[in-house]
Image (cartoon, helix red, strand yellow):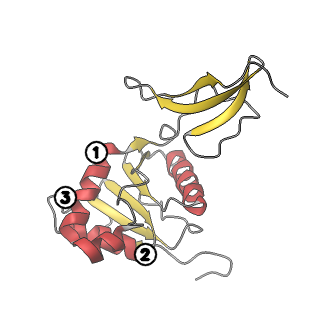
């Protein structure tokens, strides 16, 4: 260990496979690797469990063009780590994809929760589903069309704002064909105070 540096990541054996999964937490890395090795995905992925959101994954073995899938917790620290790790690995030439933030379901924070409560087979099935739903780095959070500075959003889906001089109720929508997010406006009154 080096003073001022984070704890090293846990890395699966045989770190020579052409695809990678990087997750927050050493034990989560172990759980994911065990689930993959017990499934039809055996032998396909290197797995790293980074020591918390402040650490950095090992990158020297990641080759240009190799796929790297990232999963972190949904909290602010996890979001920052997801962005940083994606940026750094993309700079190395990796094709970075993010597993869905709510991959493990309601009330289940991480891979260890699933492995402990439902078993490795269930965890493997969720990881396979997440790999199919993964979004390229930079595409997972498209900007929302129609947002205006000064809007107030008391919840993730509903807010208030002024449009054309009128106070409006705002709601987030998603285009069914393109997946783009947009804001709908419903005037509440024809003036603002």
Q: Quadrant of the C terminus?
A: top right
Q: Residues within 10 Å of mark 1 (few under 14, many from 20)?
A: few
Image quarter of residue 41? bottom left
Q: Secondary structure at mark 3?
A: loop
Residue at 63% x, 81% y: name it. 2
Instruction: Choose between 169 and 43: the one closer to the eye.
Output: 169
The picture places residue 183, in percent across and down from the top left corner, at 57, 27
Looking at the rendered image, the disc whose residue lies closer to the viewer, 1 or 2, is: 1
Looking at the rendered image, the disc whose residue lies closer to the viewer, 1 or 3, is: 1
Q: Secondary structure at mark 2?
A: helix
Q: Earlier in the sequence, mark 3 or mark 2?
A: 2
When the figure is inspected, residue 118 is found, relative to residue 101, above or below; the finding is below
Instruction: Choose between 91 and 122: the one closer to the eye.
Output: 122
Q: Residue furthest right?
A: 193
Q: Quadrant of the N terminus?
A: bottom right
The picture places residue 46, in percent across and down from the top left corner, at 32, 62
What residue is pinned by disc 2? 26
Q: Secondary structure at mark 1?
A: helix
Q: Residue furthest front?
A: 189
What residue is pinned by disc 1? 132
Residue at 56% x, 51% y: name it. 83
Q: Is residue 14 visible?
A: no
Looking at the image, residue 77 sits to the left or right of residue 97; the answer is right
Q: In 3D space, how far apart are the residues under numbered discs 3 and 2 (Cα atoms)? A: 20 Å
What residue is pinned by disc 3? 41
């Amino acid at each position: 260990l080096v003073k001022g540096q984070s704890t090293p990541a846990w890395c699966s054996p045989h770190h020579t496979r052409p695809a990678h999964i990087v997750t927050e937490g050493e034990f989560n890395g172990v759980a994911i690797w065990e689930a993959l090795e017990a499934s039809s995905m055996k032998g396909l992925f290197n797995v790293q469990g980074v020591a918390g959101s402040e650490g950095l994954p090992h990158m020297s073995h990641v080759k240009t063009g190799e796929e790297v899938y990232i999963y972190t917790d949904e909290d602010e620290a996890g979001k920052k780590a997801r962005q940083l790790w994606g940026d750094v690995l993309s700079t190395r030439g990796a094709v970075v994809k993010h597993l869905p933030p709510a991959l493990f379901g309601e009330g289940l924070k991480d891979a260890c929760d699933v492995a402990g409560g439902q078993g490795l087979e269930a965890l493997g099935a969720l990881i396979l589903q997440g790999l199919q739903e993964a979004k390229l780095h930079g595409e997972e959070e498209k900007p929302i069309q129609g947002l205006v500075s000064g809007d107030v959003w008391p919840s993730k889906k509903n807010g208030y704002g002024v449009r054309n001089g009128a106070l409006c109720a705002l709601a987030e929508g998603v285009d069914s064909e393109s997946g783009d997010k947009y804001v709908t406006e419903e005037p509440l009154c024809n003036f603002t105070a």
